[in-house]
Image (tube, rainbow, N blue to C red):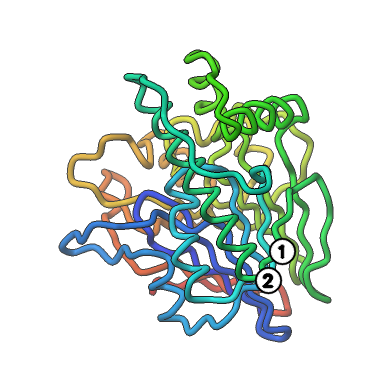
Amino acid sequence: MLKLDFFNVGDGDAILLREESSDFVMLVDTGRPHIEFTEGSKRAVAVKHLMQEHVGHIDLMVLTHLHFDHIGGALSILRHIPVKRLLAAYLPPENAGWVYAPDSNQKTIVGLIDALNLFSDIVSAARACGTVCERAANCNLRLTDELSMTVTTPDNALLARQKEHFDAIYRGAALPEDVLYACSKDRNVSSLRLLLSYAGRSILLTGDSYASYWEHDPGQPCDILKVPHHGDEKSMTQLLLNRLRPEYAVISCENAAAPKKERPAPHVLTMLLDQVPHVLCTENRAFANYPAGTQSAVRLEIHPDGSIRSSML
């Protein structure tokens, strides 16, 4: 059996996959480094979820892209749980240290530099622990006898541009503000996308890749979809949903009384509810067509006969 836990880490992603027969453990993204207590919410940092599930090792950790709500929990996990391999679309140069944010009033630029500093700490800590750190490429991987994964990276031009600019930032180069702004805004579309296959079923984990960026890519329908970018207005288009046709759609979001961003966006949630048999949220505020809810995790189990069962933890 393959067990998937979509942890409630608030407005972020942390997805645990465990194949019982092989004891293979995989974690895709790690949520934020800190999550403020909110009364009535079950959200928590990823390492707490992992310890509650008695996860004693991780064979593969994938970080889809460099935003705090996807990489923020990695350091605490590395300090508590052995990780065999780490996979990311980009790796810092050897011995990359901290860099300083330029004098900018652009929040996204300061956030980019902060994320790069955290990421260099993550990779350094991983290497110090003996974790093999690998730069992702388009490939098909056999993870176990029964579980396989196809990795899809962004287009080569975007990857090359990102590497050039991130390397320059780590070297201390003074890049123009418009270049730094574009680098920061490219982070979502630079997300890795992972297609896993088990028992004749497919699971598509999409990071934060905007639907318009990949809605024309070739690909087959999936059975389980992690809705990109927390179900916001950029997460899904009708064209993409028509192609994917999932049986289950999972949205990672938070139940904020006064949300700063529409996650999920009402029209995206309605689109999903109209076409997807099972739409599940890790946490969400109430909508006219969908009740509010909070759980520790959304759990999906794929059994050897291909049947899927869902539960809320």
Q: Label 2: how many residues lie within 10 Å, few (<14), some (14-19) or many (20+)?
A: some
Give the CA distance from mark 1 to mark 2. 6 Å
Q: Amino acid at mark 1?
A: Val
Q: Which residue is mark 1?
A: 132
- The quarter of the image holding the C terminus is bottom left
Q: Residue 271, image x and y in percent?
A: 47, 38
Q: Is residue 303 above or below residue 251?
A: below
Instruction: Please give the name of the residue rendered at 76% of the width and 71% of the height, measured from the top-left corner.
Output: 199
Within the image, what quadrant is residue 298 found in? bottom left
Instruction: Please give the name of the residue rendered at 38% of the width and 73% of the height, measured from the top-left corner.
Output: 48
Instruction: Please give the name of the residue rendered at 65% of the width and 33% of the height, measured from the top-left corner.
Output: 167
Instruction: Please give the name of the residue rendered at 31% of the width and 51% of the height, measured from the top-left corner.
Output: 254
Circles 1 and 2 in contact, beta carbons < 8 Å: yes
Mark 1 element type = strand
Residue 210 visible in image: no
Q: Residue 312, image x and y in percent?
A: 40, 71
For residue 84, the mark is 2
Q: Is residue 39 above or below residue 187?
A: below
Q: Count up the numbered dots.
A: 2
Front residue of 82 and 155:
82
Q: Is residue 176 above or below residue 141?
A: above
For residue 37, the mark is none
Q: Residue 61, image x and y in percent?
A: 62, 63
Residue 196 visible in image: yes
Mark 2 element type = strand
Within the image, what quadrant is residue 283 found in? bottom left
> For this view, does 153 lie left or right of residue 29?
right
- The quarter of the image holding the N terminus is bottom right
Front residue of 154 and 57:
57
Q: Amino acid at mark 2?
A: Lys
Q: Label 1: how many residues lie within 10 Å, few (<14), some (14-19) or many (20+)?
A: some
